[in-house]
Image (cartoon, helix red, strand yellow):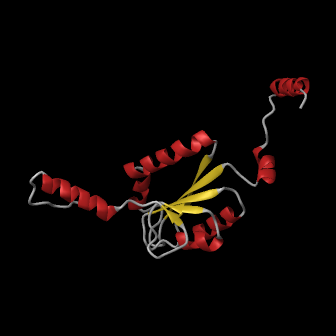
Amino acid sequence: VDPQIQELVRQAVAQTGYVPNQAARSLVTRRTSSVALVVSEAEHRTFDDPFLGRIFTDPFFGRLVSGIMGVLRPRGVAMVLMLAENDQARSQLIGYLKQGHVDGVIAVSASSADPLPGLLTEAGLPAVLSQRPVSPLPISYVDAAQSAGAKLAADRLAERGCRRVATISG
């Protein structure tokens, strides 16, 4: 493009305050520049449940969100928080996601009985789980090596001469 025309366009953009329409741009690129962070639970809990209400104050959840934002923000990708507390909410969520409102899903669940990972797989949606799925699924996940971590901790304590070791868990 002719440099003079480029400068005229830049001036027009500055004078008018033009901002590209992301929705229109998404029609061409088929990208939304957003990712859904889905907090899901098995049917037996609701978001009124005091236990589940604590997920938002749990330090792990805060670090998880902070880590996700630390990766997404520099890339110009927004995070959309979504909740899926029962079958109806999960069904609505899958319908929303299949319409292409986000580019992918990061799913967080505190329950091994949560059906969401299977629903995401069946729908063919790009997704990553925050933990290893209970049953084998063709889906990506991030998980801590719990056994290896416990072994490292026990070895360290043994090296320091500890002979009576206890485990405290929530």
Indicate left or right for 126 with 46 as reference. Answer: right
Residue 76 lies in quadrant: top right
The quadrant in which the C terminus is found is bottom left
Image position, residue 80 (x, y; %): 60, 51
Residue at point 42%, 64% (across, down): 110
Q: Is residue 88 visible?
A: no
Asked whether the viewer can see residue 133, the reply is yes
Relative placement, left or right, of 110 versus 9 is: left
Q: Residue at x 51, y 48 (%)?
A: 68
Residue 45, horizontal then vertical, whole percent: 44, 68
Q: From the viewer's side, name the closer residue of 103 and 168.
A: 103
Choose between 75 and 23: the one closer to the eye. Answer: 75
Image vertical order of residue 45 relative to residue 14, above or below: below
Task: Determine whether, in the image, residue 148 is placed left or right of residue 135.
Answer: left
Q: Quadrant of residue 20?
A: top right
Q: Taking 129 as reference, is 50 left or right?
A: left
Residue 33 in the image: above or below residue 154: above
